[in-house]
Image: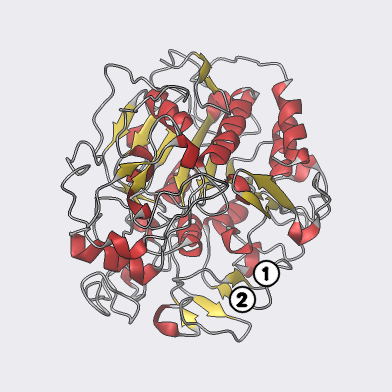
Amino acid sequence: MHHCFTKALAALTAAAITLLPAPSAFAGDSDDFRTATPIKHIVVIFQENVSFDHYFGTYPHATNPAGEPAFRPKDDTPRVNSLESAGLLTNNPNVANPFRIDRINAVTCDEDHGYGDEEFAFDGGLMDRFTKLSCNDVAKNGIPGIGPNSTFGYFDGNTVTALWNYAQHFAMSDNSFGTTFGPSTPGLLNLVAGNTFEGTIMNGKSGKGNIAGAGNAGAVIGDPDPFGDTCSAAGRAQISMSGQSIGDLLTAAGITWGSFMGGFALNVTNNDGSTGCTRASSGLSGKTGDYIPHHAFFQYWASTLNANHTRPTSAAMIGHNGDAANHEYDLIDFWAAVKAHNMPAVSFLKAPAFQDGHAGYSNPLDEQTFLVNTINALQKSDEWRETAVIVLYDDSDGWYDHVMGPIVNQSNVSDDQLLGPGNCGTPSTKQVGGVDQNGRCGYGPRMPFLVISPFAKRNYVDHRVTDQSSIIRFVEDNWGVSRVGGGSTDAIAGTLNGFFDFDDRSSTGKLFLDPATGQVVDSDSN
């Protein structure tokens, strides 16, 4: 964790906890926006590259070897659709069976998670071609690797201990999917717009692997950088998105919001002397740059671009319309806003890269440190009593998962492989919003989805279908703004209503964990 983020967390941790009564009306305090639920603040933590089975394949049963953080479930833990419950730990349809990755092997190689390759692995729902996605995980620093069938590896509650404990004390889904197949950029576009169409390449680079059908404009299927971002790589395809995102709707309504990314502030110097676009941090996986442009939620739209990463004029302006930061901030600005009791209504958080969970340059242990420190600090804020934190992921990294979701968007571009070459069904003008937007095959892979809040149901598993764009549907419904439109999947996304119980106020819903082990330190969440 870089110096400024650590300093901000330390300052927040020292603040006194004020317990206030639950709001009796959804209008909230005089400076709150009227909402459909008692939730006045949503904090979306968008992590990287994990399938559901990769983190929850044997939940709630951990191996508990000596010397590792132990996890023992509550007796009434509900059943999830996992590798274990489906009987797929042995006699798997793939050429290899799933296997447990020990905590000592937390650092793994990065799997293949291309749009077409993921579809091919799904094999029309047979889910039997995942060997194609495997990297050969070799020895590192004297520790044996997990081998050539690495994509079948999964972690249990002795490594992803914090996430399993959050699932025990709050609510999770075992039926939430990427809105489309493919890597990081389609995932973030779906999170904030419910749409990967239309991206246009602005710097003359090839559309192959970036735009469906190798076009210069169309649905985004790869990881091009945002056009205009001063940190975007000159040698990489750069795109600009048409249409609008949830940010545009919130700005128009005057509702406070912000995107907060590790490494975004270019005037900050890390402890190692790195600064600007090349600020970097070190973790178990080595050293990597904090800021990754193709993970930058709202930098793809001209309306929400902060091209030069201009700093906010004051903590009081964070989240508000009116200064050149344009709602695009560093993580240190989020904590400055929280400390000033100016926490935006809607916040999107991105960890510095070494803590975002992406195999190759990050890992579940560094990710756990970020998640726990963030959630612990939020629980010590006065605003916690009206807050919901949602943890979800941008793509699966290609890690094996045994569940295929419904295909709500068909596609037949050359990149598609779900039902054969060029085949993810037959697109129709009756698709989302009446707009035929080819190249958006989905739903894609199943991924973890957790809701941590005083309002979250306790030790609850939601089985209803949701996807990444369910986030923007919740924001739209809770704060009363319109749908994104233009073919956005917010129009058909499953709601998050099932995760919450707004009548049960038996506790303040606090669960403090150890960031190193993920184990419970203190709790009043039953």
Residue type highlighted by circle 1? Ser
Q: Residue at x 46, y 25 (%)?
A: 68
Query: Secondary structure under badge 1?
Result: loop
The correct choice, above or below, for 208 with respect to 128 in the image is below
Q: Say if residue 461 shows up in the picture.
A: yes
Q: Which mark is residue 236?
A: 2
Q: Provide residue 434's location: percent of width, then percent of height.
A: 31, 71
Q: Residue at x 18, y 41 (%)?
A: 86
25, 160: nearer the viewer: 160
Residue type highlighted by circle 2? Arg
Residue 489 vs residue 361: left or right?
left
The correct choice, above or below, for 452 with respect to 259 in the image is above
Q: Which mark is residue 232?
A: 1
- The reply to whether dot 1 and dot 2 touch (C-beta < 8 Å) is yes
Query: Secondary structure under badge 2?
Result: loop
Residue 364 vs residue 153: left or right?
right
Name the quadrant containing residue 492.
bottom left
31, 60: nearer the viewer: 60
Q: Provide residue 334's location: percent of width, then percent of height.
A: 69, 41
The correct choice, above or below, for 487 with respect to 324 in the image is below
The correct choice, above or below, for 381 with respect to 448 in the image is above
Residue 17 vs residue 401: left or right?
right
Q: Residue at x 49, y 42 (%)?
A: 106
Q: Provide residue 478's location: percent of width, then percent of height.
A: 46, 41
